[in-house]
Amino acid sequence: MFSLFDLTLHYNGFPIQKAKEQLAEILAIPETNYEEFIVSSRQKIVEFHLQNNAYYRHFAGINEFENWESLPVMQKKDFQQPLIERLSQGFAENKVYVNKTSGSSGDPFIFAKDKLCHALTWASNMYRFGWFDIDFNTSYQARFYGIPLDFFGNKKERLKDFLSHRFRFTIFDLSDTVLEGFLHHFRTRKFDYINGYTSSIVLFAKYLQKKNIILKDICPTLKVCMVTSEMLFEDDKILLEKQFGIPIVNEYGASELDLIAFQTPNDEWQVNAETLFVEIMDDYNNVLPYGQEGRVVITSLFNKVHPFIRYDIGDIGILDERSTLKKPILKQLIGRTNDVAILPSGKKSPGLTFYYVTKSIIEDDGNVKEFIIIQTKIDTFEIEYVSEKELTAEQIQDIEKAITLYLEPNLKFNFTRKTTLERSNRGKLKQFRSMV
């Protein structure tokens, strides 16, 4: 018998029961046979696209599968053409799941999944959320996400929220007055879990800290909080655990693929090896061994309508040395490949280095709520921040000293205090970006 969430998927043509059964079969494969499953699955999806997808056949430059290692790596820029030209034969746009990426990497594009592939994505989500006793059919979600502001887009999203048993906190205005309204909802509703963008949830936790409130004290039904889409820093995780009084789970995913990694109850960032195959590559497309840092390259094993084969998602990460094919573990997600600052000396530094260093100083007293860093010239950076009081000259000097120590001297910084920070149209906050 279907519950409401499952029924909604089924009604929209997504065979969720079949997907759950297929996922269960994959999960039951023993470690000793898992290499055979991976090798077979990735060969099948490549052969399918070579036979049925003219776009991929042209891109790969081959007509028959020869070996995995010789297949080319796909980039987001390779998808900057009409979707109809990328679909496999036998699939029409109005008969598949179509969506678009957020464009947080600077390369937005429209993509598609066949109905079973998308159902598998949901089955994968349900399985992992179930680790924390969350059931999409019955658990009540406090959702910290953006929402379309146009009439029809807004109503459509609200309907999806109703059918998915979730209450949406819109995050375009996160002033104290609005956050007090959030607090009221937690006092009066029986939420089971929180899910949403990291920066917005952290901002809410800082408000609770200022008010000396533990969220679970006023909403005892809360079990867990899942953060997604933006980096979760260790000190922010500690803050969330303290102010919410519940476990904090770090999620890593991509709308065009699936959940990529999800934190387990044992605090391991386990990679999805059921519907995806994840490789770490160097700049020359060589696969790196476990423990080495490189580009995250992912294959969707079951998407027949659109090829994502050896797809460079634009992130940099490390798979743990303890990883196996059945249970890969993401040791570290370092950031996006385009979030790199090129400095006057020629040195390249991950943009989040600035963020880490600055964050360690300006948040000591709780004055600064959030901030972003923008590189405008090779030696010049804009730091925009929201705070109760303006930064002092001494604090600014401390930041500049720390960055000189960790990076290099003679960099210029302009500090601008703002009432709010610019977010994407979906409500995401990009912590560092380079205009160079």
Image (tube, rainbow, N blue to C red):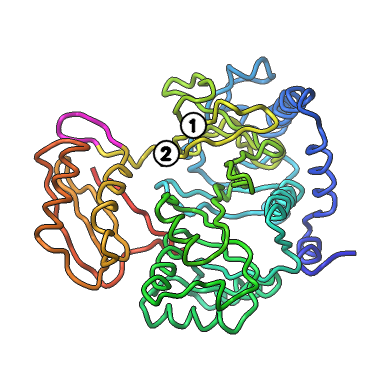
Task: Kindly identify which numbered label has been placed on residue 382.
Answer: none
Q: Is residue 256 left or right of residue 63?
A: left
Relative image position of residue 92 (x, y in whole percent): 70, 50
Three-letter amino acid code at disc 2?
Answer: Ile
Q: Nearer the viewer, residue 288 or 76?
A: 288
Relative image position of residue 163 (x, y in whole percent): 71, 72
Relative to 178, residue 428 above or below? above
Relative image position of residue 272 (x, y in whole percent): 65, 40
Q: Tell me the element at label 1.
A: strand
Task: Kindly identify which numbered label has been placed on residue 334.
Answer: 2
| Magenta run includes residue 115 | no
Q: Is residue 75 left or right of residue 70?
A: left
Q: Is residue 243 left or right of residue 56?
A: left
Q: Which residues are magenta?
A: 342-349
The CA distance from mark 1 to mark 2 is 8 Å
Q: Which residue is mark 1?
A: 318
Q: Nearer the viewer, residue 402 or 338?
A: 402
Specify the quadrant of the image occupied by residue 72.
top right
Q: Tell me the element at label 2.
A: strand
